[in-house]
Amino acid sequence: MDADGRSTVKQTSQAGAPAQAGAAGDDRTELRVCVVGDELVAGAGDARGLGWTGRVAARTRFDGVTVVMPLAIPGEGSSALSQRWDAETSRRFSGAPGADNRLVVALGRHDVDTDLSLARSRLNLANVLDVAEQRRLPTFVVGPPPGAPEQNGRLQELSDAYADVASRRRVPYVDTFAPLVGHEQWLGDLATGPTGMPGQAGYGLMAWLVLHTGWHAWLGLPDPAL
């Protein structure tokens, strides 16, 4: 992996756009992936406008027609996310009967900004995962990355709490905090980017972590590294 998170996986799609990996006329089940989260989902601070979501989509060999849809609200914490995700994703999933619909919950750092209690953050994620299970909606969780040094103690606790909630429900969880909290490229991006946002290198690192922490297995796709 280089500083931008490039791998040997062939680029096959762009976030928010259909990606066709099969032959013309392929009638295999359409895959729809909604990614709910804050400005990190939208790639804020990335000069290329891809963020980690676009990089992951572009480096996944999807099997057939796929639509990856980032649904971002800047400044959103887990409470607001837990209240709006169901209605927003249902609208995207309802237009293709029989599609393979999947949810990615991308948790940001704003619960720490607003001093939300750890218990409430846990409950918010638990509610999302429990409703998704009722909907029979396969779910994948991406945890919050490191931020300002004075916040990182709380962010570590938050990431660990989210990981526990996901583990108890056997939902894949990507820890972006522990691998990046002391990473030189990540720290360099935060030091030079707008209001603590990563840049191309930082989003590349986040994408690499997602791609190498159960992403392909969750999608039922072969791991290109094997």
Image: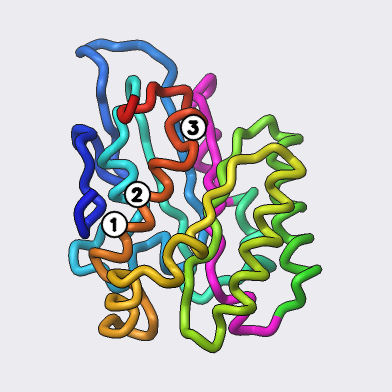
SS assignment at label 1: helix
- Relative to 133, is 88 on the left or the right? left
Residue 204, which numbered label? 1
At 59% from the left edge and 83% from the top edge, which residue is drawn?
Answer: 113
Q: Which residue is at 34% across, 24% downward?
A: 226
Residue 91, compared with residue 70, is above or below; it is above
Judge whether residue 120 is colored magenta: no
- Image point 22% across, 12% down: which residue? 23
Q: Which residue is mark 3?
A: 95
Residue at the farthest bottom position: 150
Q: Residues within 10 Å of mark 1 (few under 14, many from 20)?
A: many
Name the disc covering residue 208, or none. Answer: 2
Q: How is the image coloured?
A: rainbow
Choose the circle earlier in sequence order: 3 or 2. Answer: 3
Q: Amino acid at mark 2?
A: Trp
Distance CA(mark 3)–CA(mark 1): 32 Å
Q: Is residue 83 visible?
A: no
Q: Quadrant of residue 132?
A: top right
Inspect the image, locate mark 1, and give the three-letter code of the amino acid beneath it. Gly
User: Depth-wise, is mark 3 or mark 1 nearer the camera?
Assistant: 1
The amino acid beneath tag 3 is Gly
Q: Say whether marks 3 and 1 touch (CB < 8 Å).
A: no
Residue drawn at point x = 37 percent, y = 62 percent? 42
Q: Residue 59: give x, y in percent of width and height.
A: 27, 39
Q: Is residue 97 magenta?
A: yes
Lateral position of residue 88 relative to residue 198, left or right: right
Q: Position of residue 200 (x, y in %)?
A: 23, 64
Task: Look at the image and give the residue range highlighted in magenta.
Answer: 88-115
Closest to the observer, 100 or 223: 223
Estimate how packed mark 2 is, as few (under 14), some (14 to 19) or many (20 or more) residues with alpha carbons within 10 Å: many
Which element type, helix, strand or loop, lies under badge 2? helix
